[in-house]
Structure formats: C-alpha cells, structure tokens
Image (cartoon, rainbow, N blue to C red):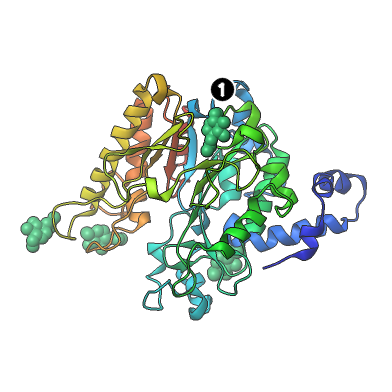
Amino acid sequence: MRHPLVFAISCAAASTLVAARESSGEPTLGELALQKVLGDSREIFGVYDDEDEDEEGEHPYANWMSRVPDSTPLAHLNIPGVHDAATWNYSQATQDMLAPGVARCSGGSGRPAPAQVYRTQRRGAAAALDAGVRFFDLRFAADALGQGLAFWHGGALLSAAADVDDVLFGFYAWLERHPSESVLLSFQYEGGTREGAEFDGEVKGRLKRALGEGEEGSGGARRFVRRGGGDKGRLGTLGESRGKIVLLKRFDMEDEDEGEDGEGLPGLHLSPAKWPDNNPDGFELVYNATSGERAFIEDYYEPTIGSGSNSSVAENVRAKMEAVKAHLEIAAAATGVARDSLFITFASGEHNDNNPPVFPQTMALGNGTEVTPDGGVNHHLATLLREMRGSRLGVVVVDFFDEPADLVGLILGS
Ligand SMILES: *[C@@H]1O[C@H](CO)[C@@H](O)[C@H](O)[C@H]1NC(C)=O
Ligand SMILES: *[C@@H]1O[C@H](CO)[C@@H](O)[C@H](O)[C@H]1NC(C)=O
Ligand SMILES: *[C@@H]1O[C@H](CO)[C@@H](O)[C@H](O)[C@H]1NC(C)=O
Ligand SMILES: *[C@@H]1O[C@H](CO)[C@@H](O)[C@H](O)[C@H]1NC(C)=O
C-alpha cells in the first residue's frame, strides 16, 4: 500500500522519466518506481488499450481539449464523466478474494451485497481518459489497517492493493503526457471500513497529505492539482486548468471556508450537507457564498415508482431518463448566471432493492431481453444526445461509459 521509495522521488524526476527512457535502454530507478506504483493502481485506475497507443488514430478524443480556446470557462464545456469510476474490475471474484474482515461494510451485517450492486463500469480510468472522459467520481474511506485511503463504493472495499496515492499517480502520469487536457476529480467520503468509522482528523490528515498544497502535501499534488491564492471556490477557465486536476470536494473539512491562507485543500467544495439525497428534480448548490458561484446537479440515482419495490426495468429506465432529459434541457437553455455555472447531470442509476433488482448495469444497458427492447439509459441517452447535438450540456456522468461506443463522442457533441 505504501511506497516510501516512490514518494521520495521528486516531481522533476517523474517529468524526466520519458526522456530517460529514450536516451538509454536501461530503465532508471525512477522509472521502475513509477512502473511499480502504476502496477499497484491497476485494479482501480485500470489498464490502457494498448501501451504504444496511436492516440489520435485509435482515440480521437484523447486530446479533445487542445482544440478549445484557453479563455473558455470550464462551465461552458460538455464534459463526459464516469460515475463510481473505481469499480471497473469489481466482480464477485474480486469480492470473494478480499478478506471478509477487511471488505465488510461499516456497521453492516459483515457481508457486502452481491458484486453487481457495486459495479458501475467495466473500463477503468486509463481507458476512460483516452476515450475523452474528463470527470471522475471517486469514493474513498480510511483503509482498514489505518494506513492510507482506500477506494470504496457503498459497503464494499474495491481493492486491497490500490490506494488513493497510487491512483493519483495514474492521473499525474496521464496528464504529463496530455498537457492540453484538464481533469475534474470528485472525491467523496464513503463511510467507513470499520464499525463506527468517521471522517475524523486522522482521515482528513491523510487527505491533506494526498492532495494538499502545504509542506505536508505530496509533491505530485503540488504540481498537478490546480491551486493558488484566490483559486479556492472558483471553477475558472480551461487555460488555467490545462495539465491539471480540478478538485471537487464532496466532504467537509473544518477549515474549508477559511479563505486564502493556503490552509485546507484547493478546489470546489460541494458539501454533502448541501447535496439532497436522490432528489428527482435536480438542485442548486452554492459552493462559494462570496462570489455566488454555484452548481446545478441532477443525481436521482434510485427512481421511486409507485409505493412498492416491484417496478419493471423499463419503468426504472424511463423514470431515470425523464430526470436526465429535464436537466439537460435546463443546461442547454440556461442564460445568465446559470449559463456560467457548472452543470452536472448524473445519468447513472439503480434500483438494487427492487424485485427483480435493477442493478447499475441493468439500468445503464438494459437487461438484454425483450424486457428492454430499446436498451437501457445509455441507449436512450445516445438518442437524446443526437437530437440535442450542438447544445451546451455541462458534465454528463454515466455508468458503463463504453456502451454504446459513440456515447462519449455524443456527449462531446461530435
Ligand atoms: C481483476 O479482478 C480479477 C478478479 O479478482 C483479478 O484476477 C485481476 O487480476 C484483476 N485485474 C486487474 C487488472 O487488476
Ligand atoms: C469565493 O470567491 C471569491 C471571489 O472569487 C474568492 O476570493 C474566495 O476565495 C472564494 N471563497 C471560497 C470560500 O471559496
Ligand atoms: C406492484 O404491487 C402492487 C401491490 O401488490 C400492485 O398494485 C402493482 O400493480 C404492482 N406493480 C407492478 C409494476 O407490478
Ligand atoms: C430481465 O427481466 C425480466 C423481467 O424482470 C426477468 O424475468 C429476466 O430474468 C431478466 N433477464 C436478465 C438476463 O436479467
């Protein structure tokens, strides 16, 4: 989990890795260390399609931001996003392999639900970045051994090998090779590994070490996470964000609103206290009370249909799509302050406790039978996006981003 050697490597060393490989056949120690940390991150960060990628050929959107002017506000872009980005390799085999004592849910029965309940992707961040995705929803908790920060979804530990530091290196390494691009990383505190675990000083300290800018922060974060003076609480333009991560904080640090003294973490504070659960209509979240900067968010992840839990897959898909369509139409028609605000539309959803269960995959892709002749939310969304081509959409967050194959391109408006 911890890699003292890797953290001892300076940013400068990391930036010369590629050059070093070209000038001599032998990998440098720094290269080997980066390989190790990227290897450790694979279960979460994923693997590339092809290590010698021919990017513009195979991946037409690998550098899509390079064609957008510097002065463009990030709020004006259509940004493909992935919900629960860390779940791509979470199968029943993964769950069974993780020691039950480590993988248990906080305060739960001791056994997580079936793997399908948690799994929302089948490609990792590496493939998503090359495909054009620029928003990643990541859920963390303190790992059970009390060392670092692990990735969690609901009650499930997603990997015992990859921690938050490892995966951040994956993003840094990609950004180093794609300096025109900017990535929005949303970090959400997701309950605890242990009974009664809380978002306490210990967890906050680990988060500051992973992402902070002060002396205790990591060198990688100082270089790759956008920050600086009055930068907190401002979404800003693409130009100032290129080659950087823009943080979205779905957790509450006590010093969050203390201003510009360099304490705390950079980025936008999307406080969980201001994020109503499963709101069908979407909501407005003011993340900077001084400037009035705000986000408009739709996160109706579990449709409520009738009074029972016996709704059909098709009913769930339809209810979710209604919420998505309404929100995208608001984004497209927005003027004034709303036009300049961050829009986030979650097209992801589930109804796991329905009978039969509508797992995230069923919701996104349909259940593969005549029960969903037109597929799931993703297929309906693709149809809608064709009709809305040319519209401003904001961030559109999906499950199973790789299906249908043109979904990411359609979000980008291509
Ligand atoms: C994905 O999960 C399976 C089952 O746990 C595991 O054998 C495999 O190594 C994992 N793949 C990666 C790239 O980590
Ligand atoms: C809010 O925005 C103002 C003006 O851009 C900035 O000076 C301040 O640091 C921001 N405050 C917070 C809490 O993000
Ligand atoms: C669900 O169950 C209720 C009560 O048993 C029934 O009235 C309703 O028609 C059922 N709905 C569906 C979609 O099967
Ligand atoms: C599809 O949904 C129907 C109706 O709920 C169910 O009977 C069937 O088992 C599901 N098929 C698959 C492959 O999930």
Residue at the farthest right position: 24
Work out whether residue 169 can be spotted: yes
Q: Residue at horizontal 62%, vertical 60%?
A: 206
State the image coordinates of residue 236 (x, y, percent, origin top left). Answer: 57, 29
State the image coordinates of residue 235 (x, y, percent, origin top left). Answer: 54, 32
Using the image, determine if residue 329 lies above or below residue 15. above
Q: Within 8 Å of ligand 2, the CB of disc 1?
A: no
State the image coordinates of residue 309 (x, y, percent, origin top left). Answer: 19, 60
Quarter the N terminus occupies? bottom right
Specify whether 223 is left or right of 188.
right
Residue type, mark 1 in image: Thr
Instruction: Say which of 164 and 65 sits in front.
Output: 164
Residue at disc 1, secondary structure? loop
Q: Which residue is mark 1?
A: 72
Using the image, determine if residue 176 lies above or below residue 3. above
Residue 336, image quadrant: top left
Instruction: Say which of 247 and 159 sits in front.
Output: 247
Q: Quadrant of ligand 2?
A: top right
Q: Residue at horizontal 39%, vertical 25%?
A: 338
Specify whether 3 is left or right of 277.
right
Specify whether 326 is left or right of 147.
left
Q: Few, some or many C-alpha atoms within 10 Å of disc 1 (few <14, some 14-19, many ≥20)?
A: some
Work out whether residue 389 can be spotted: no
Instruction: Say which of 350 and 241 sits in front.
Output: 241
State the image coordinates of residue 187 (x, y, percent, origin top left). Answer: 52, 51
Using the image, determine if residue 268 lies above or below residue 114. above
Using the image, determine if residue 372 lies above or below residue 406. below
**Count of residue discs:** 1
